[in-house]
Image (spheres, helix red, strand yellow):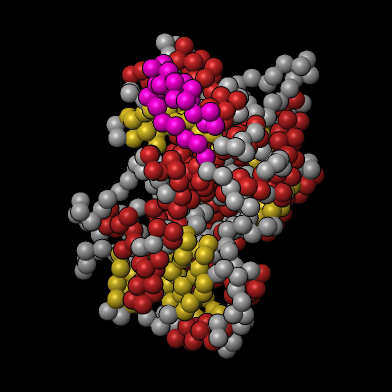
């Protein structure tokens, strides 16, 4: 079935513009009916220091609703003041298929896209409201794509290409995604548990969500946080009043992911002025303590703390953290703590948790009916046979043959790192796959505290080929080399196409195509993958861990296995590999034949 084109009108965002549109519609009956009598979606927008601020809305009566916005423009601190002060523009969008549910979905995706855009600094009504089944929901994607393409004809600076939007880290972590069935069931169960705990005035409660990489833990967490902050999920007191001033926080021990959440909060205007609701774990814990760990700086517990990548929390002393276990500390300072966890992504000894410790958390959650497991793989476009091939490599150390029928997934093994680089750069030059980068196991020296003595950068070196490690061009490159954009993750920065990423920059993020260099710490001998800790430069992974009984134990092989698993599961559309070990490279090539 052919989907009709939308009707979009662009007018000055003022009463004069509204009069111009009304006069035009008086002469155009078909458009007049769609805009006057059907639901519409509209976008107020204005420039602010070469960036845009927007307000997206929907209404059954566009003219009446817009007039209300104009009448409110003198409200103190209201966004409507910008309409008059910033030479604002107004888009009104209509379509023959528009009904209430469809316009709500269009509004939601417009907010999702615009909040993910590097050209937009703030959305003033970040009200996500994705709809379930309705007529004609099966046509929604086609209708929206036509709307977006037509909007781009008006302003390409504001309406970036869909590929640019979807490649952004903010888009992928956004709370505005529609959840799959598994995520939706999990969300309902968790919100019900949070409600129960708050109504019964419980404290120090744990909700434990477990899932492999790519199962949608971050989106689930982001969606719940967003709804609670926006009071969409109302917690009702026994006397019927609404639970007010719900205090929520996001905690993540990952610099790149922390930046993404800070940008989401800023763009969607989720926090009050000068309020911080995104923390690394040490900063939040220290809110309750002074430098001597006593007395408390903050007396009131958070209602809910969401912990993403909870497997990255520290469990052993280091210079910035002096307690035994950050997760135990966070549980002390909240009524409910919701953690997203994947043991297979623990990468160093400071984060190590043994099975008994993990099982204690799981048991605590299960006893309270607050344990969730996500199983549906959402990241990689490969079929079950591709996923099985990767899992067999990382879990069992075996390399099996994988069928040539791999779904929409591209796997290649290269004999030369320069050939892999050429292939990744070719993908990155295409707007549809531009978020393609090279990553590597941590098998070459790097220090954030010093510069190398014999070279300009800390490099990944293989024969005569070398490329700088992540963030090196920003540290030591010229202004021409480094074009960093504030708020963008490592892989989104333009200069990083010439760098090599590590697990420390890419963990938790997607790539269109991942070029993975498997360094000399990973070899193939006697029909099995082995891990050579002496060949790794990741001392946090290979150093021995001091146990509670005073013994010193190495978990290096387990951490190197986890590192390989993280890198091999980054690519959404494809995985390109170069292995330094000759035997490993040959058996990988044969497995694809």
Residue at figure coordinates x 44%, y 25% from the top left: 24
The image position of residue 42, as x and y in percent, is 50, 29
Residue closer to the observer: 78 or 238: 78
Quadrant, the C terminus: bottom right
**Range of the magenta residues?**
6-31
> Is residue 162 on the magenta stretch?
no
Residue at figure coordinates x 78%, y 41% from the top left: 368
Residue closer to the observer: 206 or 588: 588
Residue closer to the observer: 130 or 179: 130
Q: State the residue lying farthest toward the bottom.
A: 526
Quadrant housing residue 137: top right
Residue at figure coordinates x 62%, y 38% from the top left: 97
How many numbered marks are there?
0
Res. 265 visible in picture = no
> Is residue 7 on the magenta stretch?
yes
Up-down: is 560 above or below 315? below
The image position of residue 130, as x and y in percent, is 63, 38
The image position of residue 66, as x and y in percent, is 49, 19
Up-down: is 134 above or below 100? below
Res. 577 visible in picture = yes
Residue at figure coordinates x 43%, y 14% from the top left: 73
Q: Is residue 306 left or right of residue 284?
A: right
The image position of residue 581, as x and y in percent, is 44, 82
């Amino acid at each position: 079935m052919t989907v009709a084109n939308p009707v979009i009108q662009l007018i000055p965002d003022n009463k004069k513009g509204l009069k111009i549109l009304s006069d035009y519609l008086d002469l155009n009956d078909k458009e007049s009916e769609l805009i006057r009598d059907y639901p519409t979606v509209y976008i107020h927008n204005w420039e602010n220091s070469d960036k845009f601020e927007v307000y997206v809305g929907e209404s059954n009566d566009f003219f009446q609703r817009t007039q209300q916005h104009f009448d409110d423009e003198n409200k103190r601190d209201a966004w409507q003041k910008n309409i008059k002060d910033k030479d604002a523009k107004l888009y009104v969008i209509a379509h023959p298929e528009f009904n209430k549910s469809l316009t709500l979905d269009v509004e939601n995706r417009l907010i999702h896209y615009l909040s993910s855009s590097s050209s937009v600094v703030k959305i003033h009504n970040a009200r996500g409201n994705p709809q379930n089944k309705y007529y004609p929901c099966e046509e929604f994607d086609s209708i929206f794509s036509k709307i977006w393409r037509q909007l781009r004809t008006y302003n390409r600076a504001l309406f970036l290409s869909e590929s640019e939007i979807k490649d952004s880290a903010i888009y992928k972590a956004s709370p505005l995604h529609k959840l799959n069935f598994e995520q939706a069931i999990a969300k309902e169960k968790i919100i019900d548990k949070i409600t129960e705990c708050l109504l019964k005035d419980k404290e120090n409660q744990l909700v434990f969500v477990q899932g492999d990489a790519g199962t949608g833990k971050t989106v689930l967490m982001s969606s719940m946080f967003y709804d609670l902050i926006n009071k969409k999920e109302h917690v009702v007191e026994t006397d019927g009043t609404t639970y007010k001033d719900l205090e929520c926080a996001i905690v993540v021990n990952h610099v790149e992911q922390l930046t993404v959440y800070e940008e989401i909060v800023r763009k969607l205007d989720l926090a009050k002025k000068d309020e911080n609701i995104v923390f690394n774990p040490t900063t939040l814990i220290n809110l309750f303590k002074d430098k001597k760990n006593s007395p408390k700086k903050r007396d009131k517990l958070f209602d809910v703390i969401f912990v993403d990548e909870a497997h990255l929390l520290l469990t052993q002393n280091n210079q910035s953290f002096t307690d035994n276990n950050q997760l135990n500390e966070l549980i002390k300072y909240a009524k409910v703590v919701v953690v997203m966890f994947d043991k297979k992504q623990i990468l160093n000894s400071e984060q190590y948790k043994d099975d008994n410790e993990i099982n204690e958390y799981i048991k605590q959650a299960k006893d309270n009916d607050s344990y969730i497991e996500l199983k549906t793989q959402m990241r990689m476009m490969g079929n079950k046979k591709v996923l099985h091939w990767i899992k067999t490599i990382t879990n069992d150390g075996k390399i099996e043959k994988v069928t040539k029928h791999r779904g929409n997934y591209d796997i290649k093994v290269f004999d030369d790192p320069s050939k892999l680089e050429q292939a990744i750069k070719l993908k990155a030059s295409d707007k549809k796959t531009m978020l393609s980068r090279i990553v590597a196991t941590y098998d070459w020296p790097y220090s954030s505290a010093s510069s190398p003595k014999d070279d300009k950068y800390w490099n990944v070196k293989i024969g005569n080929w070398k490329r700088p490690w992540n963030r090196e061009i920003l540290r030591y490159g010229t202004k021409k080399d480094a074009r960093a954009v504030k708020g963008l993750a490592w892989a989104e920065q333009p200069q990083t196409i010439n760098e090599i990423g590590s697990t420390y920059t890419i963990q938790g993020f997607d790539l269109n195509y991942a070029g993975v260099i498997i360094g000399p710490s990973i070899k193939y001998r006697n029909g099995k993958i082995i891990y050579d800790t002496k060949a790794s430069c990741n001392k946090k992974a290979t150093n021995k861990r001091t146990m509670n009984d005073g013994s010193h134990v190495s978990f290096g092989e387990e951490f190197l296995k986890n590192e390989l698993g993280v890198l091999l599961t980054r690519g959404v559309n494809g995985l390109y590999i170069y292995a330094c070990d000759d035997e490993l490279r040959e058996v990988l090539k044969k497995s694809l034949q």
